[in-house]
Amino acid sequence: MNNNDVFRNLRYIFDFDDNKMMKLFSLGNKAVTRAQISDWLKKEDHESYKTIVDENLSAFLNGLIVLNRGAQDGSPAVNEKRLNNNQIMRKLKIALQLKDEDLIEILSLIDFKISKHELSAFFRKPGHNHYRVCKDQILRKFIFGLRAKYRP
């Protein structure tokens, strides 16, 4: 699942308009234009399609966190230059204030069963013995579960 797919799906799930999208980026300390957002939302075969880089998707997700949970005291959140599926899933978990049980429930909405232990492996540090890479299939199922929950 590429960044543009994640971006498009989140816009659809939460029914964000362009103004809201621009606000989320600004909350994530990134200035973007309406044209950039439009290009990121286009399908791959469209001539003005542009890939949203990790740093921009990170800014969007950080903006979602700030919108839903408020800004942290101290320094603003850092927009990662490289994102992986584990980080995307973690940011969504934080932004939506989800607990492990909520994640399991969301995944069960699309008939995907996962244990609490398997799920917690995605949120461990990469050097940890029980760390597990979140593959595209898991992230895709999580996003489809979000769609089933928030946009039935």
Image (cartoon, rainbow, N blue to C red):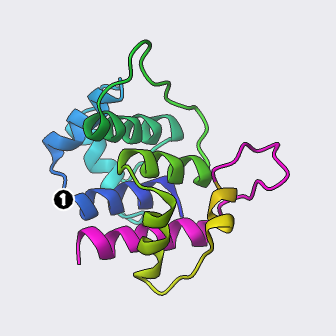
Label 1, residues with CA under 10 Å away: few <14, some 14-19, many ≥20: few
- Which residue of the protein is positioned furthest toward the top in this rendering? 74
Identify the residue shown where x is 27% and y is 56%.
11
Residue 106 visible in this rendered orientation of the protein: yes
Residue 137 within the magenta-colored segment of the rendering = yes
| Image location (x, y in percent) of residue 61 | 40, 42
- Judging from the image, what secondary structure is the residue with disc 1 in? loop
Q: In the drawing, does residue 119 fall left or right of residue 7?
A: right
- Which residue of the protein is positioned furthest toward the bottom in this rendering? 111
| Image location (x, y in percent) of residue 152 | 23, 78
Q: Which residue is mark 1?
A: 15
Identify the residue shown where x is 53% and y is 82%.
112
Depth check, front residue: 98 or 148 = 98
- Asked which quadrant contains residue 106, the reply is bottom left
Q: In the drawing, does residue 19 fall left or right of residue 51?
A: left
Using the image, determine if residue 38 lies above or below residue 43: above
Using the image, determine if residue 133 lies above or below residue 63: below
Q: In the drawing, does residue 48 fall left or right of residue 78?
A: left
Bounds of the magenta span? 123-152
Depth check, front residue: 104 or 6 = 104
| Image location (x, y in percent) of residue 119 | 62, 64
* Amino acid beneath label 1: Asp
